[in-house]
Amino acid sequence: MSDDSDKPLDDFIERFSEEPGYLDFARRGPVGRTVRDEESAMSSLLGRSRFGTLGTLDEQDARVRAAVARLTGFRADQVVYQPNTSQGLMHAMFGLTGEILLSPSEFPSNTYAVSRATDALGVVTPRWLETDHGRVTPGNIKRQLRKSTVAVQVSLVDYRTGYLVDLEGIRQVIGDRLLIVDAIQGFGVVDAPYALADVVVSGGQKWVRAGWGTGFLALSDRAVETLVPVFSGFNATDADGMPTEVLPPKRGAGAFSISNPDPIAQARFAAALEEIAEVGVPAINARLAEKTSRIIDLADEFALEVTSSRDESERAGIVVVTPDTDQLTLLTASLHNHGVTSTAREGAVRLSPHVTTDEETFAMLRGAFTSFGSAINL
């Protein structure tokens, strides 16, 4: 039975209602009642457009930046809203000059952004990091740094392996170079030292559970001084109201914006972040660690090889199991037949629970593993 200290988290869990069997939060997170109610309220306000009420929509930008600041440690003026992670990464990579060190195995949003910037402007040069079986560590970064390296890019959590990087260790070895972090696979469930980074980018459709069209770009003061706002729209100037001429970008993170954001999406994101802040990311992370360990224990029980880290300090909410090559189809079919939603990619199956993952889901996963085990032993 939960004690009183668990009540905020238990109340948080009660606001979600995804169907049992859902283990794919690393791909997309079903939204909860708070976010749905927020979207409904804002849509109703816009639909009625009652005199004097639409100013509420204009207030959502400051609200969402304050919510991001609360969870990241950046100041609100260091945050600019983005509709997705990819656009935030494009802003960062197109604004950079010099050599950037990153893994070629990063999620394509990262490799595409730096490659497109290289092809278009020719001022940023990717240097591809050799990793430890896909894991980006302070050690392999330190060995491959050069004097010409001006920035290092990492994912907070690797989408393939589920590996949680050591941001503190990476910051120590790279010195005063820019540290760019794609945080989407951990933001909302990992209590990371984001303020150690110079650039943090994330979307809200996965672990934050705010739906699509939500995200942010946070920039340290040094990043603001270093990055050029290549894509900077009419709303990113110091004009008081609508500019009547083409003006230079404003100083600060706000320069990295193209057009007025969707206030309803901002409200969804802000509501989700405020709800997470009330519970506390450490509490969410601790409960998620329990769910993740249970999946690892189930995989061990049925002799499925777990290729993601077992160490809590090196994982977030992703468990990767890798069956024999000729058994992958059988495993994915067993999961499908038992109603378990997961992701199969590159010969492995990725299972990603959340704090809302219930006993029925674990029973369904056990049933899928049982069917798989019975079939391979025929």
Image: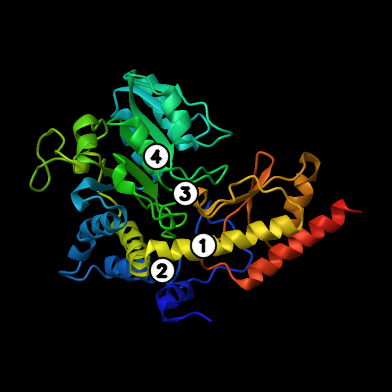
Coloring scheme used: rainbow
Helix, strand or loop at label 4? It is: helix
For badge 4, the amino acid type reads Gly
Q: Between label 2 and label 3, give the one nearer the viewer.
A: 3
Q: Earlier in the sequence, mark 1 or mark 2?
A: 2
Quadrant of image for the C terminus: bottom right
Q: In the rendered picture of this protein, how many numbered marks are placed on residues?
A: 4
In depth, the one of 333 and 129 nearer the eye is 129
Find disc 1 in the rendering and name its residue: 288
Closer to the N terminus: mark 4 or mark 1?
4
Residue 36: assigned label: 2
In the image, is residue 29 above or below residue 162? Answer: below
- Helix or strand or loop: what does disc 3 sit on? loop
Left/right placement of residue 110 relative to residue 371 reads left
Q: Position of residue 190 (x, y in %)?
A: 43, 55
Whole-angstrom CA distance, mark 2 to mark 3, is 22 Å
Task: Inspect the image, locate mark 2, and give the three-letter code of the amino acid beneath it.
Answer: Arg
Q: Is residue 18 left or right of residue 243?
A: right
The residue wearing badge 3 is 185
- Check disc 4 and report the residue beneath it: 169
Between marks 1 and 2, how big is the CA–CA gap? 23 Å
Query: Which comes sooner in the sequence, label 2 or label 3?
Result: 2
Image location (x, y in percent) of residue 89: 37, 37
Reading the chain from its start, which is encountered first: label 3 or label 1? 3
